[in-house]
Image (tube, grey):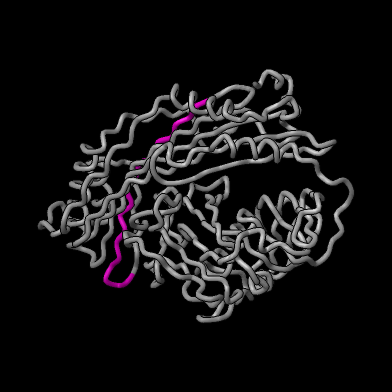
Protein backbone atom coordinates (compact mmCIF):
# COMPACT_ATOMS: atom_id res chain seq x y z
CA UNK A 1 0.00 0.00 0.00
CA UNK A 2 2.98 2.29 0.54
CA UNK A 3 4.83 1.34 -2.66
CA UNK A 4 4.19 4.74 -4.20
CA UNK A 5 6.02 6.48 -1.34
CA UNK A 6 9.71 6.08 -2.12
CA UNK A 7 12.97 6.77 -0.33
CA UNK A 8 14.03 9.70 -2.55
CA UNK A 9 11.49 11.97 -0.81
CA UNK A 10 13.72 13.03 2.06
CA UNK A 11 13.69 16.58 0.67
CA UNK A 12 9.89 16.50 0.72
CA UNK A 13 9.88 15.39 4.34
CA UNK A 14 12.25 18.21 5.22
CA UNK A 15 9.85 20.70 3.66
CA UNK A 16 7.07 19.29 5.83
CA UNK A 17 9.16 19.59 8.96
CA UNK A 18 8.98 15.83 9.63
CA UNK A 19 11.72 13.24 9.64
CA UNK A 20 12.51 9.56 9.65
CA UNK A 21 11.51 7.16 12.40
CA UNK A 22 14.98 7.18 13.97
CA UNK A 23 14.95 10.99 14.12
CA UNK A 24 11.50 10.92 15.70
CA UNK A 25 12.85 8.71 18.47
CA UNK A 26 15.72 11.07 19.25
CA UNK A 27 13.37 14.07 19.14
CA UNK A 28 11.29 12.36 21.83
CA UNK A 29 14.33 12.14 24.05
CA UNK A 30 14.87 8.40 23.58
CA UNK A 31 18.34 7.00 23.10
CA UNK A 32 19.63 3.49 22.50
CA UNK A 33 19.69 2.61 26.22
CA UNK A 34 18.62 -0.93 27.02
CA UNK A 35 17.22 -1.31 30.54
CA UNK A 36 17.96 -4.16 32.87
CA UNK A 37 15.15 -6.58 33.53
CA UNK A 38 12.98 -5.45 36.45
CA UNK A 39 10.97 -7.91 38.52
CA UNK A 40 8.37 -5.71 40.24
CA UNK A 41 7.52 -7.81 43.33
CA UNK A 42 11.16 -8.25 44.34
CA UNK A 43 12.10 -4.61 43.69
CA UNK A 44 9.00 -3.34 45.48
CA UNK A 45 9.84 -5.14 48.71
CA UNK A 46 13.48 -4.11 48.62
CA UNK A 47 12.79 -0.45 47.89
CA UNK A 48 10.16 -0.20 50.62
CA UNK A 49 12.61 -1.62 53.19
CA UNK A 50 15.30 0.88 52.17
CA UNK A 51 12.88 3.81 52.30
CA UNK A 52 11.45 2.79 55.68
CA UNK A 53 14.93 2.74 57.16
CA UNK A 54 15.83 6.09 55.59
CA UNK A 55 12.69 7.85 56.83
CA UNK A 56 13.04 6.41 60.34
CA UNK A 57 16.63 7.66 60.57
CA UNK A 58 15.80 11.12 59.19
CA UNK A 59 12.78 11.47 61.50
CA UNK A 60 15.11 11.48 64.53
CA UNK A 61 16.63 14.76 63.25
CA UNK A 62 13.90 16.46 61.21
CA UNK A 63 10.23 16.99 62.14
CA UNK A 64 9.05 16.55 58.53
CA UNK A 65 10.40 13.85 56.23
CA UNK A 66 9.31 12.51 52.83
CA UNK A 67 10.98 9.96 50.56
CA UNK A 68 10.02 9.61 46.88
CA UNK A 69 11.52 6.79 44.79
CA UNK A 70 10.96 6.10 41.09
CA UNK A 71 11.83 3.24 38.80
CA UNK A 72 10.85 4.25 35.27
CA UNK A 73 11.21 2.63 31.85
CA UNK A 74 10.25 4.24 28.57
CA UNK A 75 9.97 2.43 25.25
CA UNK A 76 9.24 4.30 22.03
CA UNK A 77 8.75 2.66 18.64
CA UNK A 78 8.30 4.54 15.37
CA UNK A 79 7.68 3.38 11.81
CA UNK A 80 7.51 5.40 8.62
CA UNK A 81 8.28 5.10 4.92
CA UNK A 82 12.02 5.43 5.61
CA UNK A 83 12.30 2.68 8.19
CA UNK A 84 11.56 1.78 11.78
CA UNK A 85 13.22 1.99 15.15
CA UNK A 86 12.78 1.17 18.82
CA UNK A 87 14.43 3.18 21.59
CA UNK A 88 14.52 2.56 25.33
CA UNK A 89 15.24 4.84 28.25
CA UNK A 90 15.77 4.01 31.91
CA UNK A 91 15.42 6.44 34.81
CA UNK A 92 15.75 5.51 38.50
CA UNK A 93 16.09 7.83 41.43
CA UNK A 94 15.29 8.81 45.01
CA UNK A 95 14.49 12.23 46.46
CA UNK A 96 14.70 12.71 50.23
CA UNK A 97 12.96 15.90 51.40
CA UNK A 98 13.29 17.17 54.95
CA UNK A 99 12.09 20.28 56.77
CA UNK A 100 14.07 21.46 59.78
CA UNK A 101 12.71 22.98 62.98
CA UNK A 102 13.58 26.42 61.58
CA UNK A 103 11.26 25.78 58.61
CA UNK A 104 14.07 25.39 56.10
CA UNK A 105 13.65 22.68 53.43
CA UNK A 106 16.47 20.50 52.15
CA UNK A 107 16.43 17.89 49.40
CA UNK A 108 18.91 15.24 48.44
CA UNK A 109 18.60 13.54 45.05
CA UNK A 110 20.36 10.38 43.97
CA UNK A 111 20.10 8.23 40.88
CA UNK A 112 21.17 5.19 42.91
CA UNK A 113 18.00 3.26 43.67
CA UNK A 114 19.93 0.82 45.85
CA UNK A 115 20.36 0.25 49.56
CA UNK A 116 23.86 1.75 49.45
CA UNK A 117 22.75 4.75 47.40
CA UNK A 118 19.89 5.59 49.76
CA UNK A 119 22.12 5.09 52.81
CA UNK A 120 24.64 7.58 51.38
CA UNK A 121 21.86 10.12 50.77
CA UNK A 122 20.64 9.76 54.37
CA UNK A 123 24.15 10.28 55.71
CA UNK A 124 24.55 13.41 53.55
CA UNK A 125 21.52 14.87 55.35
CA UNK A 126 23.17 14.25 58.72
CA UNK A 127 20.96 11.42 60.01
CA UNK A 128 22.28 8.81 62.47
CA UNK A 129 23.21 5.28 61.45
CA UNK A 130 20.50 3.68 63.58
CA UNK A 131 16.99 4.72 64.53
CA UNK A 132 13.97 3.18 66.25
CA UNK A 133 11.38 1.58 64.00
CA UNK A 134 8.46 3.73 62.87
CA UNK A 135 4.85 2.80 62.16
CA UNK A 136 4.18 3.33 58.45
CA UNK A 137 0.66 2.00 58.50
CA UNK A 138 -0.67 -0.75 56.30
CA UNK A 139 1.64 -1.77 53.48
CA UNK A 140 0.16 -1.24 49.99
CA UNK A 141 -0.32 -4.14 47.60
CA UNK A 142 2.37 -4.53 44.97
CA UNK A 143 0.95 -3.39 41.60
CA UNK A 144 0.59 -6.05 38.93
CA UNK A 145 3.35 -6.35 36.36
CA UNK A 146 2.02 -5.43 32.87
CA UNK A 147 2.60 -7.89 30.02
CA UNK A 148 6.03 -7.54 28.49
CA UNK A 149 6.22 -6.66 24.81
CA UNK A 150 9.16 -7.30 22.49
CA UNK A 151 10.60 -5.02 19.83
CA UNK A 152 9.22 -7.35 17.17
CA UNK A 153 5.71 -7.11 18.61
CA UNK A 154 5.93 -3.31 18.68
CA UNK A 155 7.00 -3.19 15.04
CA UNK A 156 4.19 -5.54 14.08
CA UNK A 157 1.65 -3.30 15.80
CA UNK A 158 3.01 -0.27 13.96
CA UNK A 159 2.82 -2.08 10.62
CA UNK A 160 -0.78 -2.94 11.38
CA UNK A 161 -1.49 0.74 12.04
CA UNK A 162 -0.21 1.70 8.60
CA UNK A 163 -1.94 -1.22 6.88
CA UNK A 164 -5.26 -0.43 8.57
CA UNK A 165 -5.65 2.82 6.60
CA UNK A 166 -7.43 1.98 3.36
CA UNK A 167 -7.17 5.54 2.02
CA UNK A 168 -3.38 5.75 1.64
CA UNK A 169 -2.44 6.74 -1.90
CA UNK A 170 0.40 8.32 -3.86
CA UNK A 171 -0.93 11.73 -2.81
CA UNK A 172 0.05 10.91 0.77
CA UNK A 173 3.78 11.64 0.60
CA UNK A 174 4.50 10.76 4.21
CA UNK A 175 2.92 8.33 6.67
CA UNK A 176 4.17 7.40 10.13
CA UNK A 177 3.01 5.56 13.24
CA UNK A 178 4.31 5.76 16.79
CA UNK A 179 3.80 3.92 20.08
CA UNK A 180 5.22 5.35 23.30
CA UNK A 181 5.06 3.39 26.58
CA UNK A 182 6.11 5.06 29.81
CA UNK A 183 6.08 2.59 32.71
CA UNK A 184 6.85 3.99 36.17
CA UNK A 185 6.67 2.55 39.68
CA UNK A 186 6.52 5.32 42.29
CA UNK A 187 6.95 4.91 46.05
CA UNK A 188 6.07 7.63 48.56
CA UNK A 189 7.03 7.07 52.20
CA UNK A 190 6.67 9.32 55.25
CA UNK A 191 6.01 8.65 58.94
CA UNK A 192 2.60 6.95 59.09
CA UNK A 193 2.30 6.74 55.30
CA UNK A 194 3.44 4.06 52.84
CA UNK A 195 2.22 4.44 49.23
CA UNK A 196 3.01 2.76 45.94
CA UNK A 197 1.57 3.14 42.44
CA UNK A 198 2.32 1.89 38.96
CA UNK A 199 1.61 4.27 36.11
CA UNK A 200 1.70 2.82 32.60
CA UNK A 201 1.15 5.76 30.27
CA UNK A 202 0.66 5.03 26.59
CA UNK A 203 0.50 7.17 23.47
CA UNK A 204 -0.36 5.98 19.98
CA UNK A 205 0.01 8.42 17.12
CA UNK A 206 -0.31 8.48 13.34
CA UNK A 207 0.90 11.21 10.97
CA UNK A 208 -0.16 11.86 7.38
CA UNK A 209 1.25 14.51 5.04
CA UNK A 210 0.28 15.61 1.53
CA UNK A 211 0.84 18.48 -0.85
CA UNK A 212 -1.94 20.97 -1.55
CA UNK A 213 -0.59 22.93 -4.49
CA UNK A 214 2.58 24.48 -3.07
CA UNK A 215 1.37 24.12 0.53
CA UNK A 216 2.30 21.17 2.76
CA UNK A 217 -0.61 19.79 4.79
CA UNK A 218 0.17 17.63 7.84
CA UNK A 219 -2.48 15.91 9.94
CA UNK A 220 -1.86 14.01 13.15
CA UNK A 221 -3.98 11.64 15.20
CA UNK A 222 -3.13 10.68 18.77
CA UNK A 223 -4.70 8.71 21.61
CA UNK A 224 -3.12 8.89 25.07
CA UNK A 225 -4.18 7.09 28.24
CA UNK A 226 -3.08 5.22 31.35
CA UNK A 227 -3.70 1.48 31.38
CA UNK A 228 -3.28 -1.42 28.97
CA UNK A 229 -1.56 -1.23 25.61
CA UNK A 230 -4.74 -1.89 23.62
CA UNK A 231 -7.25 0.03 25.74
CA UNK A 232 -7.69 2.86 23.20
CA UNK A 233 -6.70 1.66 19.71
CA UNK A 234 -6.53 3.87 16.64
CA UNK A 235 -9.35 2.50 14.51
CA UNK A 236 -9.42 2.16 10.74
CA UNK A 237 -12.03 4.90 10.63
CA UNK A 238 -9.77 7.23 12.67
CA UNK A 239 -6.82 6.62 10.35
CA UNK A 240 -8.87 7.02 7.18
CA UNK A 241 -10.29 10.31 8.45
CA UNK A 242 -6.75 11.56 9.17
CA UNK A 243 -5.60 10.72 5.64
CA UNK A 244 -8.62 12.38 4.10
CA UNK A 245 -7.99 15.49 6.19
CA UNK A 246 -4.44 15.66 4.83
CA UNK A 247 -5.83 15.46 1.29
CA UNK A 248 -8.48 18.11 1.88
CA UNK A 249 -8.32 21.05 -0.53
CA UNK A 250 -7.49 24.42 1.01
CA UNK A 251 -9.25 27.54 -0.25
CA UNK A 252 -6.73 29.67 -2.19
CA UNK A 253 -6.18 33.33 -1.49
CA UNK A 254 -5.61 35.41 1.61
CA UNK A 255 -7.78 35.22 4.72
CA UNK A 256 -9.44 38.52 5.69
CA UNK A 257 -8.78 39.42 9.33
CA UNK A 258 -11.85 40.17 11.42
CA UNK A 259 -13.90 39.47 14.52
CA UNK A 260 -16.04 36.34 14.28
CA UNK A 261 -18.19 34.02 16.29
CA UNK A 262 -15.99 30.93 16.47
CA UNK A 263 -16.62 27.32 17.40
CA UNK A 264 -13.44 25.87 18.87
CA UNK A 265 -13.10 22.16 18.21
CA UNK A 266 -11.92 20.15 21.26
CA UNK A 267 -8.23 20.36 20.29
CA UNK A 268 -8.40 24.17 20.16
CA UNK A 269 -10.57 24.42 23.28
CA UNK A 270 -8.00 22.24 25.09
CA UNK A 271 -5.18 24.70 24.35
CA UNK A 272 -7.31 27.68 25.39
CA UNK A 273 -8.24 26.11 28.74
CA UNK A 274 -4.75 24.79 29.44
CA UNK A 275 -3.32 28.25 28.79
CA UNK A 276 -5.86 29.74 31.22
CA UNK A 277 -4.87 27.25 33.93
CA UNK A 278 -1.13 27.72 33.47
CA UNK A 279 -1.36 31.50 33.12
CA UNK A 280 -4.08 32.42 35.63
CA UNK A 281 -4.73 29.46 37.94
CA UNK A 282 -1.25 28.17 38.76
CA UNK A 283 0.76 29.74 41.58
CA UNK A 284 4.05 30.40 39.81
CA UNK A 285 6.31 33.47 39.84
CA UNK A 286 4.95 36.04 37.41
CA UNK A 287 6.35 38.97 35.55
CA UNK A 288 6.29 42.35 37.29
CA UNK A 289 2.89 43.94 36.87
CA UNK A 290 1.02 40.67 36.30
CA UNK A 291 -1.98 40.61 38.61
CA UNK A 292 -3.09 37.47 40.40
CA UNK A 293 -6.83 36.87 40.15
CA UNK A 294 -8.64 37.43 43.41
CA UNK A 295 -10.44 34.49 45.00
CA UNK A 296 -13.95 34.31 43.60
CA UNK A 297 -13.17 36.66 40.71
CA UNK A 298 -15.21 36.15 37.54
CA UNK A 299 -12.62 34.80 35.10
CA UNK A 300 -14.87 33.13 32.53
CA UNK A 301 -18.44 32.66 31.41
CA UNK A 302 -20.85 31.22 34.02
CA UNK A 303 -21.12 28.20 31.72
CA UNK A 304 -17.50 27.24 32.48
CA UNK A 305 -16.82 24.82 35.34
CA UNK A 306 -13.31 23.40 35.14
CA UNK A 307 -11.79 20.73 37.39
CA UNK A 308 -8.43 19.10 37.73
CA UNK A 309 -9.27 15.44 38.30
CA UNK A 310 -6.42 12.89 38.44
CA UNK A 311 -8.90 10.20 39.58
CA UNK A 312 -10.67 9.97 36.18
CA UNK A 313 -10.35 6.35 34.91
CA UNK A 314 -7.71 5.95 32.20
CA UNK A 315 -6.64 9.61 32.23
CA UNK A 316 -3.16 10.08 30.78
CA UNK A 317 -2.35 12.64 33.49
CA UNK A 318 -4.02 10.67 36.28
CA UNK A 319 -2.37 9.21 39.37
CA UNK A 320 -3.18 7.77 42.80
CA UNK A 321 -0.95 10.29 44.61
CA UNK A 322 1.17 13.24 43.52
CA UNK A 323 4.91 13.69 43.90
CA UNK A 324 4.47 15.24 47.35
CA UNK A 325 2.62 12.12 48.50
CA UNK A 326 -0.84 13.76 48.58
CA UNK A 327 -3.66 11.39 47.64
CA UNK A 328 -5.45 12.20 44.39
CA UNK A 329 -8.77 14.05 44.61
CA UNK A 330 -10.70 16.31 42.20
CA UNK A 331 -9.99 20.03 42.59
CA UNK A 332 -12.41 22.62 41.19
CA UNK A 333 -10.48 25.49 39.59
CA UNK A 334 -13.36 27.42 37.99
CA UNK A 335 -16.86 27.17 39.42
CA UNK A 336 -19.46 28.75 37.10
CA UNK A 337 -16.68 30.96 35.75
CA UNK A 338 -15.41 32.12 39.14
CA UNK A 339 -11.94 31.29 40.43
CA UNK A 340 -12.35 28.58 43.06
CA UNK A 341 -8.76 27.40 43.62
CA UNK A 342 -5.23 27.67 42.34
CA UNK A 343 -2.74 24.90 41.73
CA UNK A 344 0.06 25.28 44.30
CA UNK A 345 2.42 22.75 45.87
CA UNK A 346 1.69 21.87 49.48
CA UNK A 347 5.20 22.74 50.62
CA UNK A 348 4.35 26.40 49.97
CA UNK A 349 0.98 26.12 51.71
CA UNK A 350 -1.09 25.61 48.57
CA UNK A 351 -4.05 23.34 47.88
CA UNK A 352 -2.03 20.73 46.04
CA UNK A 353 -0.74 19.28 42.76
CA UNK A 354 2.95 19.48 43.54
CA UNK A 355 4.51 17.58 40.64
CA UNK A 356 8.04 16.80 39.55
CA UNK A 357 8.76 16.58 35.81
CA UNK A 358 9.88 13.02 35.19
CA UNK A 359 9.04 12.43 38.90
CA UNK A 360 12.62 13.44 39.79
CA UNK A 361 13.02 17.16 38.96
CA UNK A 362 12.22 20.09 41.25
CA UNK A 363 8.66 20.15 42.53
CA UNK A 364 6.36 22.66 40.85
CA UNK A 365 2.59 23.12 40.72
CA UNK A 366 0.95 21.73 37.59
CA UNK A 367 -2.38 20.33 36.46
CA UNK A 368 -2.88 16.59 36.05
CA UNK A 369 -6.10 15.88 34.13
CA UNK A 370 -8.24 18.93 33.40
CA UNK A 371 -11.93 18.34 32.80
CA UNK A 372 -14.42 20.88 31.46
CA UNK A 373 -17.97 20.05 32.56
CA UNK A 374 -19.87 19.39 29.29
CA UNK A 375 -22.94 21.27 28.13
CA UNK A 376 -26.18 19.85 26.80
CA UNK A 377 -25.99 20.61 23.07
CA UNK A 378 -24.73 18.46 20.22
CA UNK A 379 -21.75 20.05 18.48
CA UNK A 380 -23.67 21.00 15.26
CA UNK A 381 -26.10 22.96 17.43
CA UNK A 382 -23.26 25.40 18.16
CA UNK A 383 -22.98 26.31 14.47
CA UNK A 384 -24.32 29.58 13.11
CA UNK A 385 -22.56 32.26 11.06
CA UNK A 386 -18.83 32.35 11.69
CA UNK A 387 -15.93 29.92 11.71
CA UNK A 388 -14.98 26.51 13.09
CA UNK A 389 -11.37 26.55 14.28
CA UNK A 390 -9.74 23.11 14.11
CA UNK A 391 -6.38 21.52 14.84
CA UNK A 392 -4.96 23.42 17.81
CA UNK A 393 -1.20 23.88 17.38
CA UNK A 394 -0.18 25.92 20.42
CA UNK A 395 -0.51 29.25 22.15
CA UNK A 396 1.59 32.12 23.46
CA UNK A 397 0.32 34.10 26.44
CA UNK A 398 1.55 37.22 28.21
CA UNK A 399 0.10 37.33 31.75
CA UNK A 400 1.08 40.98 32.19
CA UNK A 401 -1.22 42.05 29.33
CA UNK A 402 -3.60 39.05 29.34
CA UNK A 403 -3.03 38.71 25.58
CA UNK A 404 -3.19 35.29 23.95
CA UNK A 405 -2.32 34.16 20.42
CA UNK A 406 -3.75 30.72 19.71
CA UNK A 407 -2.58 29.02 16.51
CA UNK A 408 -4.87 26.64 14.58
CA UNK A 409 -4.27 24.43 11.57
CA UNK A 410 -7.41 25.58 9.73
CA UNK A 411 -10.70 27.44 9.86
CA UNK A 412 -13.96 26.37 8.21
CA UNK A 413 -16.48 28.99 7.18
CA UNK A 414 -20.05 28.66 8.46
CA UNK A 415 -23.20 30.19 7.04
CA UNK A 416 -26.64 29.60 8.56
CA UNK A 417 -25.27 26.73 10.63
CA UNK A 418 -23.66 24.81 7.76
CA UNK A 419 -20.09 24.70 6.38
CA UNK A 420 -19.73 26.55 3.08
CA UNK A 421 -16.82 24.39 1.89
CA UNK A 422 -14.26 27.16 2.32
CA UNK A 423 -11.30 25.99 4.40
CA UNK A 424 -8.43 28.33 5.32
CA UNK A 425 -5.07 27.10 6.58
CA UNK A 426 -2.79 28.59 9.26
CA UNK A 427 -5.19 30.73 11.27
CA UNK A 428 -4.82 32.24 14.74
CA UNK A 429 -7.24 33.55 17.35
CA UNK A 430 -5.90 36.59 19.20
CA UNK A 431 -7.07 38.88 21.97
CA UNK A 432 -7.63 38.99 25.71
CA UNK A 433 -7.73 35.57 27.33
CA UNK A 434 -10.29 36.75 29.88
CA UNK A 435 -12.46 38.19 27.11
CA UNK A 436 -12.38 34.94 25.13
CA UNK A 437 -13.31 32.91 28.21
CA UNK A 438 -16.04 35.37 29.20
CA UNK A 439 -17.57 35.29 25.70
CA UNK A 440 -18.21 31.52 25.82
CA UNK A 441 -21.95 31.16 25.25
CA UNK A 442 -22.30 27.45 24.44
CA UNK A 443 -20.52 24.19 25.29
CA UNK A 444 -21.12 20.90 23.50
CA UNK A 445 -21.89 17.63 25.23
CA UNK A 446 -19.32 15.31 23.59
CA UNK A 447 -15.85 15.59 25.21
CA UNK A 448 -12.59 14.48 23.63
CA UNK A 449 -9.39 13.70 25.55
CA UNK A 450 -5.87 14.89 24.74
CA UNK A 451 -2.39 14.60 26.17
CA UNK A 452 -1.03 18.10 26.79
CA UNK A 453 2.51 18.64 25.51
CA UNK A 454 5.48 19.84 27.52
CA UNK A 455 8.49 21.77 26.16
CA UNK A 456 10.79 19.47 24.20
CA UNK A 457 13.75 20.22 26.47
CA UNK A 458 11.97 19.20 29.69
CA UNK A 459 11.05 15.97 31.38
CA UNK A 460 7.34 15.13 31.01
CA UNK A 461 4.69 16.02 33.56
CA UNK A 462 2.05 13.79 31.90
CA UNK A 463 -0.85 16.21 31.69
CA UNK A 464 -4.15 15.69 29.90
CA UNK A 465 -7.50 17.35 29.33
CA UNK A 466 -11.03 16.26 28.45
CA UNK A 467 -13.14 18.96 26.82
CA UNK A 468 -15.97 19.26 24.31
CA UNK A 469 -16.20 21.93 21.61
CA UNK A 470 -17.23 25.40 22.73
CA UNK A 471 -18.35 28.67 21.15
CA UNK A 472 -16.90 32.13 21.78
CA UNK A 473 -16.08 35.31 19.87
CA UNK A 474 -12.77 36.93 19.00
CA UNK A 475 -10.41 38.29 16.37
CA UNK A 476 -9.35 35.72 13.78
CA UNK A 477 -6.52 36.40 11.37
CA UNK A 478 -3.97 34.71 9.15
CA UNK A 479 -1.20 33.19 11.23
CA UNK A 480 1.67 35.64 11.63
CA UNK A 481 4.30 33.26 12.98
CA UNK A 482 4.61 29.92 14.73
CA UNK A 483 3.15 29.84 18.28
Bounds of the magenta span?
Answer: 85-103
Q: Magenta segment: does it hold 95?
A: yes
* Residue 372 vertical position relative to residue 75 in the rendered view, above or below: below
* Residue 410 vertical position relative to residue 28 in the rendered view, above or below: below
Residue 24 appears in the rendering: yes
Question: Does residue 188 appear to the left or right of 377 in the view shown?
Answer: left
Front residue of this view, candidates 387 and 78: 387
Question: Does residue 436 appear to the left or right of 178 in the view shown?
Answer: right
Question: Does residue 60 appear to the left or right of 197 in the view shown?
Answer: left
Residue beneath the point at 15% across and 51% down: 129
Residue 22 appears in the rendering: no
Front residue of this view, candidates 44 and 471: 471
Q: Position of residue 95 (x, y in %)?
A: 33, 52
Residue 216 falls in image quadrant: top right
Q: Position of residue 364 (x, y in %)?
A: 45, 60
Q: Give the position of the N terminus as an image quadrant.
A: top right
Q: Position of residue 172 (x, y in %)?
A: 71, 30
Amino acid sequence: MLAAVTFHRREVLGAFGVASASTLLWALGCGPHVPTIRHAPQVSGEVRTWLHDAVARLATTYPTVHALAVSRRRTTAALDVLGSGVARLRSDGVILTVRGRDGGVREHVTSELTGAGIDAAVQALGAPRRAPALDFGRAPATPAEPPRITDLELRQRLEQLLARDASLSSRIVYAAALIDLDDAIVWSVAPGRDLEQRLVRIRRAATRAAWNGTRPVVRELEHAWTGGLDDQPLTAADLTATSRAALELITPGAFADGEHTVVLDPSVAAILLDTAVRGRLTATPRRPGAARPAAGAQLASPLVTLLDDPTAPGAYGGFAFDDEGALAAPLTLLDAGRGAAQLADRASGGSGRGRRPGHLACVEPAASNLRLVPGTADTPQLYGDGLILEGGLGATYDPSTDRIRLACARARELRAGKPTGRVYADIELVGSLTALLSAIDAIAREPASFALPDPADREPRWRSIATPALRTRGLVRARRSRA
